[in-house]
Image (cartoon, helix red, strand yellow):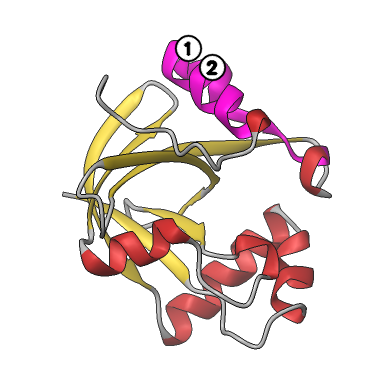
Amino acid sequence: MNDIRIPDSMPRWIKDHVALYLRDGEAGHYWDASLGGGKGMLTTLLLTTTGRKSGQPSILPLIYRPTGTGGFCVIASKGGAPAHPSWYLNLEANPRVHIQVATEEYDAVARVAEGEERDRLWTLMVDYYAPYTDYQAATQRKIPVVVLDPA
């Protein structure tokens, strides 16, 4: 995974988090949510997608929760911006991804949760990181709830 690209546009604190995670999966697994309006230390995973334009791997940390069915759930919020985040557009183009959860690594397939599953996972994520509610209120798009199922 040494050839992974960390986007230049990524804020320094996110680059630092990725670097820590890659160096020490246990330490990088946690993120201080107060940096983004949440409370306490939350678990993150590293998601590696393939760039839809570049074809190169791109990595970033995301808050996650286990789905209860063997997968992991993340939210494509982009802070409530009107457009989806680039990582989400990448996985729409190619749903095969790589994830690191603490010190465990998995190849996975991404899919968008729908219906009752989406409602359940959205509630799970909002209970874990309340600012998602504000992000949804800030945009007209329905924020995707993404499930990462280990392949």
Residue named by callout 1: 24
Q: Where is residue 129 in the image (x, y as percent from the top left)?
A: 72, 54
Quadrant of residue 115 within the rendered picture = bottom left
Main SS class of the magenta portion in the image: helix
In which quadrant of the rendered image does the N terminus lie? Answer: top left
Quadrant of residue 125 within the rendered picture = bottom right
Tell me the amino acid under the disc marked 2: Leu
Looking at the rendered structure, the secondary structure element under dot 2 is helix
Q: Does the magenta stretch include residue 49?
A: no
Assess whether mark 1 and mark 2 are in contact (beta carbons under 8 angstroms).
yes
Tell me the amino acid under the disc marked 1: Asp
The answer to whether one can see residue 67 in this image is no
Look at discs 2 and 1 and give the one toward the viewer. Answer: 2
Residue named by callout 2: 20
Q: Residue at x 48, y 12 (%)?
A: 24
Label 1 CA crowd tier, 10 Å (few <14, some 14–19, many 20+): few
Q: Where is residue 136 in the image (x, y as percent from the top left)?
A: 69, 76
Please report the bounds of the magenta region as a residue range: 14-34
Is residue 24 found left or right of 130 in the rendered image? left
Q: Residue at x 54, y 38 (%)?
A: 44
Quadrant of residue 6 within the rendered picture = top left
* Residue lying at the far top of the rendered structure: 23
Looking at the rendered structure, the secondary structure element under dot 1 is loop
Q: Position of residue 72 (x, y in %)?
A: 40, 51
Distance from label 2 to label 1 (Cα)? 6 Å
Q: Residue at x 58, y 70 (%)?
A: 122
Seen in the picture, residue 50 relative to 130 is either above or below; the reply is above
Is residue 136 found left or right of 71 in the rendered image? right
